[in-house]
Image (spheres, helix red, strand yellow):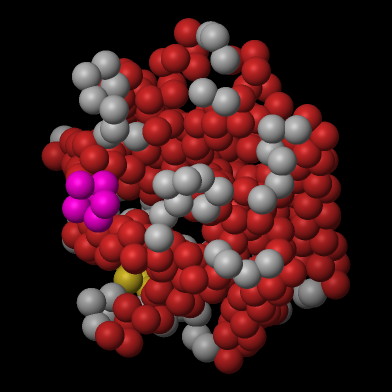
Amino acid sequence: MSERLIGLDIARYLAFVGMVLVNFDIAMSYGVPSNEGFFNEFIGQLRGRASATFVLLAGIGLGLSSFKKESQTVNTVVKRSIFLLILGLLNMTIFEGDILHYYAFYFLFGVFLLPFGNRVLILVIGILNIVFFGMMLFIDYESGWNFEELTYSGFWTIDGFIRNLFFNGFHPVFPWLGFFLLGVLLSRALLKKRQVQIKMITWGLVAIIFSEIMSFIFSGYVIPADSELQFLFMTDSMPPMPLYFLAASGSAFLIIGLCLLLSEKFRESKVYSLIAPAGTQTLTLYILHIIVGLGFIDAIGFTGTQTSSQAFIAAIIFCILGTIFAFTWSKWFRRGIFESLMRKLTG
């Protein structure tokens, strides 16, 4: 396995762990008063960052596939998008924070944009952010939401589904498709080159620092604290304003760049051998963390009753068990359960 793929496996695994931490925290401690500063802050920093890294990695995967002899055709990707949409909608009946049905549309739009050059993709990324910014000025972002309970009404109606998908869901196409397209752009770079990896780390840090400073200046000094325009300069993932997009992109660049840079040291390590299968079975582990992990949490009555530290511990336990499961499964099977099912059904 190339150094490049090793780094991407590690980054994908870390992004998955971050998503599990966030989802367990939402399920177990959302709305529960807590003064656990460290855990609240740590998991808070992962919200919208881990999932953005995950989406960006998906874009890299699609982009890299276009360079291989077994390049995925539009027909194959469309079928896999339908598979992810169905799986995601089924998942939505259990967990409203599902990301898979959004993935379906990232891949669907992404495969049709794949033939275009870098300048076009950069332009599309900019348009996605500008359009979302404009929608925030003219459309009620809270429509459908009960933020006290973090529930969304009307999702199963045509209007509600479209609104959630493109505008005010957890990971709306505007501007989240931009993360996917950034991944496609990265796939065209020589990711194995040390110079490229260092540039990713450097620009990632610059993006994070710049966006946070701008957010601090505008929300702390330029825009009055009681102004309704405060949201325009937030770096939180909801709503995903341009400064958030910049910060989350920077985080993804930083993590992926570091993983690629350090991957050579992990090439023959037991640590990599243990986590690599989990990094290639993230679809299966994502489904399992909802059905098994959060299902167990709900069954024992821990939903909405625990602290962030308890959610953190539960998430880490699941990640350890999930890693062991993926490692064991890989001894007999080449792909994960749902990865194999998707390939069998879609080619």
Give above or below for 3 relative to 24: above
Q: Is residue 65 visible?
A: yes
Which of the pair 81/229 is nearer the observer? 81
Q: Is residue 337 magenta?
A: no
Horizontal and vertical percent for residue 264? 65, 18
Picture quadrant where residue 225 is located: bottom right
Q: What is the total number of numbered labels drawn onto the structure image?
A: 0
Please tell me which residue is depicted at 32% across the width and 71% down the height of the picture: 152
Give above or below for 242 relative to 88: below
Residue that lies at the very extreme toward the left in this rendered image? 299
Which of the pair 48/345 is nearer the observer? 345
Give above or below for 160 relative to 107: below
Q: Which residues are magenta?
A: 342-347
Horizontal and vertical percent for residue 174? 54, 73
Picture quadrant where residue 133 is located: bottom right
Q: Is residue 313 visible?
A: no
Please tell me which residue is depicted at 52% across the width and 53% down the height of the picture: 66
Horizontal and vertical percent for residue 156? 23, 77
Horizontal side of residue 261 vs 274, given as left or right: right
Give above or below for 75 relative to 163: above
Horizontal side of residue 276 vs 174, given as left or right: left
Which of the pair 237/217 is nearer the observer? 237
Horizontal side of residue 190 vs 61, given as left or right: right
Q: Main secondary structure of the magenta part?
A: helix
Residue that lies at the very extreme toward the bottom in this rendered image? 138
Horizontal and vertical percent for residue 275? 43, 21
Please tell me which residue is depicted at 24% across the width and 83% down the height of the picture: 157
